[in-house]
Amino acid sequence: MTAESKPKIGIYGFTGCAGDQLLIIHTEDEILNLFGATNVQSFVMASSNPIEDDLDVAFVEGSVSTEEEREHLLEIRKRAKILVAIGNCAVNGGPQAMYTGDGGYEKRLRKVYGEGVKFITKPLEAKPLDAFVDVDYYLPGCPISQPQTFALISRLIHGATPEPYPHPVCHECKLNENRCLLLDEKFCIGPLTLGGCGAVCPSHGLPCVGCWGPNEDGNFSQHLKLLESFGMSRDEIIRRIRGFGGSKIIRFIEDGGK
Amino acid sequence: MPNKNTITIEPLARVEGHGGIKVEIKDNKISNVEVRILEGPRLFEELVVGKTPQEDLSIVPRICAICNLSHKYAALRGLEKAVGVQVDPTTRLYRELMHHGEMIESHSLHIYFLALPDFLGYDNAVAMADKYRDTVTKALQLKKFGNKVMRMMGGRMIHGENPILGGFGKLPSKETLENIRAEAYELLDFAVATIDLLGGLEIPDHMERETQFLCCRPPGEDYGYYGDFLITSDGQEYPAENYKNVIKERVVSHSFAKRGQYNDRPFTVGALARILLIGERLTGKARQAYDKLVTDRWHRNPLFNNHAQAIEQVYSLEGIIDVVNQLLVSEDAVIAPPTQETGIGTGAVEAPRGTLIHHYEVKDGKIAAADIITPTAMFLDDIEAFIRTGGEQLLAREQRDNIELQFEMIARAYDPCISCSAHLVEVIYK
């Protein structure tokens, strides 16, 4: 295959920890194949001299947290046939979006940066990509998982349709035959959290903190009641659930928390 | 070559995060240098207020993927002081093992994949593979090994939750430890060969100037990556909790950024600072590498940070062998509980790219205040100073060709972590 006939891809990073791009770089067995099977036009974290042109697939990590990022995202969307949000920050807004919409953003910003300053680009309260553009596929994770990432990439570059993965962490935890931490009244939100991580934390005897964001089918109201029965206040529970759920989890809490 | 008055390098490639460099030239002199941090603000220090130490430990490593375990480690050291947790010696060894894994992961990523393509004339490491297949393949193995140790101790490669207050959720088996030790032995030859590979590179001298160095002083007599004291190249030593008096945050009017200075001047942190300040403590093959490579130029040239990282790769492989040997005859680790709900603690560690400080005030079991100072925050001023000196020299020598690459190489040598420094988003006063 010549470079011209290979699918053109771009991998971009907005505000976040760069862990999803790093995960792709860290796939020691696949990174050479990725560069061989596709025409990687732009992957600034790994390579100099990007070519910013039409793309078959754009993978975008990070939340939109500045005006410059918002404009850049709109520009990428225009030239990408398919746009994939990769990682929790792009999918849900990430931890930086845990208080998005509470009205306290300006105050927090001033507290960290001081008064009377003008930013080089206007800071925006962190939001996921789909607050600004249409997103074709979501690859959740904090960070994304290697098997899911390469299954998605190979389907997309071969023109196949990726399959959804609607299972919670709780499901994967059962497959691992772990003892349920909720039986010991541990604050675990595996039932509410999107799986794909392989239930890694419960498999280490540690409760799920929810870092992959909400699983749409989660029974929020019932789980809140269960956690309350452990003697924890509703405020405390919601504070913890929001740690990684970004702005999207609010809808589930509101729908399910009554 | 046209006489450009402003050189803008954006995006700055092969670094972690979103940044750029802007250099302004007036009358053939450098009039302004800005390392631009374009990553959006995340406000972590505010987000963790009101949370429990354990929640903080899940959240703050998300500042940075490459050095997530250094953030976890610094937070653990700060929070454990605040809530009176005394970990046992076995847990301390496991934490050293975890940290060695991260050093190998981060240093190997930086040396072979982010920095080396510049020296060999490529856009990226994959393009290098045709001519340097053996080096690239072995570098991938070494990086994979670092990741494996991180996964073993962290729970997963990036953002593992296994290190917790007082200990670990799950510990590796004896067999796993023995396998890790065997693999470290196997990789030592390649790490040592890298010393010769880097030793053979021609290192430009245009940017050379005197600077200052700072790192943690490890306890005892050995080399290491954490400590309760900060030491500096002027021979001073400070308790880590006094960090605010040592590292002064500075505001500049043209391009505001909270930046660290020591003695009102820029300073270097990272492998280069550690090797120059505590390198005499090295033993074994790392010591041989030190004796072979280190010269007086290292004090004036940040490009030798790549070489210093290569020495630390050798040190960390030997360190893994040593720590596993100790662990195999250690008592079992026990998770140590908090003994108080209110307190203050400063945790200092050496992240791969330099000194990292997490300071916490905990009140009634919740975080009341947090302060995080990252290495990239500390050395941004130093990068600018070296780019300025290098730029002036290159202009004086009339070497304007590929001047951009020369500037990028200076910035990349520091292995900057822009996500880490994002609370330094560049701002301009009205």
Image (spheres, coloured by chain):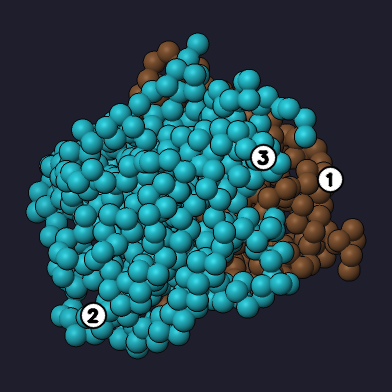
* Mark 2 chain: B
Task: Check disc 2 and give the amino acid type.
Answer: Leu
| Foreground of the two, A27 or A208 | A27
Quarter assignment of residue B185: bottom left
Q: Are marks 1 and 2 on the same chain?
A: no
Check the picture and name the quadrant holding the N terminus of chain A: bottom right
Few, some or many residues within 10 Å of mark 1 (<14, 14–19, 20+): some
| Foreground of the two, B415 or B329 | B415
User: Which chain did the renderer colour cyan?
Assistant: B
Task: Check disc 3 and give the amino acid type.
Answer: Gln
Q: State the CA–CA distance, disc 1 to disc 2.
A: 54 Å
- Looking at the image, tell me whether mark 3 or mark 2 is earlier in sequence order: 2
Q: Is A2 on the left or on the right of A84, as rendered? A: right
Q: Position of residue A236 (x, y in %)?
A: 30, 42
Q: Position of residue B105 (x, y in %)?
A: 46, 65
Q: State the CA–CA distance, disc 3 to disc 2.
A: 54 Å
Q: Is residue A135 visible?
A: yes
Q: Which residue is mark 1?
A: A54
Q: Which residue is mark 2?
A: B327
Q: State the CA–CA distance, disc 1 to disc 3.
A: 36 Å
Q: Tag 2, which secondary structure? A: helix
Q: Position of residue B360 (x, y in %)?
A: 23, 41
Q: Which residue is mark 3?
A: B399
* Mark 1 chain: A
| Foreground of the two, A91 or B84 | B84
Q: Residue furthest front?
A: B397
Quarter assignment of residue B1: top right
Closest to the camera, between mark 1 and mark 3, is 3
Q: Is B264 on the left or on the right of B120, as rendered? A: left
